[in-house]
Image (cartoon, helix red, strand yellow):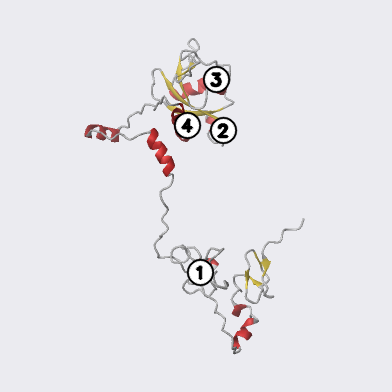
């Protein structure tokens, strides 16, 4: 299969390199970046330029603004530099000078001009939504401020009677959980499991109320999940007193005292982001 024709060969016979970004000289031939300067390829227009002419002399090629660089700038072959209609000038966004392809970025020519194009604060809409969902407390005592800096207080989940707002709160909480959750199964630690194939849960125990965030593959059975979570929580397995998972955040149709069935998939019994309690 023939390779696609990309770029062009340098018109200089002694070079003939295939350049992916060739430059066209005013003599209408394509050259590489090393031979685009008319003097380097004996441009046929040099003789014409040396002859006296009654017409207006052509504008000399604009050189790269970088120190000790004799290459033409990217604006050198533009007929009317002042006319920017339909094109973006190839100049530095900071110092507004024209450079060659090798020195076009501010870092490559050590630009000292300040970055005037300061980006405005991003995600303002998201910040406004979060501010509505999680309003900041305006009053705080010095004692509470000092204590909160040393030991982070446990925040209660925000609730709302508005269904739309409650859905937004749940979505934000789920995003936080996905970011912080660790793989419960050690076999999944080095695997790249897509987010859509993960089931994120918040787990605690009756005698260990400290919550931990984990995720399972959606193909995980509930019984195996119980054994894995018991190992993470430091709960010994006693066959005379089997362990079960209970929903701490039940829906209206669920009973909080009803244990999940160990012979079914965990994903078939709970939704993503549920809080589970492990108990006998």
Q: Going 42% across and 37% down the picture, which residue do you hit?
A: 129
Name the element at disc 1: loop
Q: Nearer the viewer, residue 268 or 90?
A: 90
The crowd level at tag 1 (other Cα within 10 Å; few <14, some 14-19, many 20+) is many
To which residue does mark 4 refer?
171
The crowd level at tag 4 (other Cα within 10 Å; few <14, some 14-19, many 20+) is few
Of tags 4 and 1, which is closer to the observer? Answer: 4
Residue 261 x, y percent position in the rendering: 55, 15
Q: Which mark is residue 196?
A: 2
Q: Which mark is residue 269?
A: 3
Q: Going 42% across and 58% down the picture, which residue do you hit?
A: 117
Disc 4 to disc 1, C-alpha distance = 48 Å
Q: Quadrant of the N terminus?
A: bottom right
Name the element at disc 3: loop
Name the element at disc 2: helix
Considering only vertical position in the picture, is 193 above or below 120?
Answer: above
Labels in figure, total? 4
Disc 1 to disc 3, C-alpha distance = 63 Å
Disc 2 to disc 1, C-alpha distance = 47 Å
């Amino acid at each position: 299969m023939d390779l696609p024709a990309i770029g062009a060969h340098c018109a200089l016979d002694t070079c003939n390199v295939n350049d992916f970004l060739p430059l066209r000289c005013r003599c209408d031939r394509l050259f590489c970046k090393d031979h685009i300067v008319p003097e380097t390829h004996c441009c046929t227009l040099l003789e014409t330029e040396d002859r006296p002419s009654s017409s207006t002399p052509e504008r000399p090629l604009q050189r790269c603004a970088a120190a000790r660089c004799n290459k033409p700038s990217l604006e050198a072959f533009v007929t009317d530099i002042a006319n920017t209609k339909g094109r973006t000038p190839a100049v530095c966004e900071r110092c507004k000078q024209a450079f060659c392809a090798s020195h076009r970025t501010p870092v490559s020519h050590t630009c000292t001009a300040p970055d005037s194009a300061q980006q405005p604060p991003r995600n303002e809409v998201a910040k406004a939504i979060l501010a509505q969902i999680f309003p900041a407390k305006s009053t705080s005592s010095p004692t509470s401020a000092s204590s909160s800096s040393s030991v982070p207080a446990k925040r209660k989940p925000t609730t709302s009677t508005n269904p739309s707002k409650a859905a937004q709160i749940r979505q934000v909480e789920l995003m936080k959980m996905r970011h912080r959750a660790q793989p419960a199964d050690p076999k999944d630690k080095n695997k790249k499991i897509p987010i859509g194939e993960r089931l994120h849960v918040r787990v605690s125990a009756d005698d260990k109320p400290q919550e931990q965030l984990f995720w399972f593959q959606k193909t995980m059975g509930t019984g195996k999940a119980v054994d894995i979570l018991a190992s993470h929580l430091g709960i010994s397995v006693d066959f005379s007193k089997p362990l079960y998972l209970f929903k701490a955040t039940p829906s209206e149709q669920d009973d909080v005292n009803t244990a999940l069935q160990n012979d079914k998939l965990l994903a078939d019994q709970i939704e993503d982001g549920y809080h589970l309690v492990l108990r006998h």
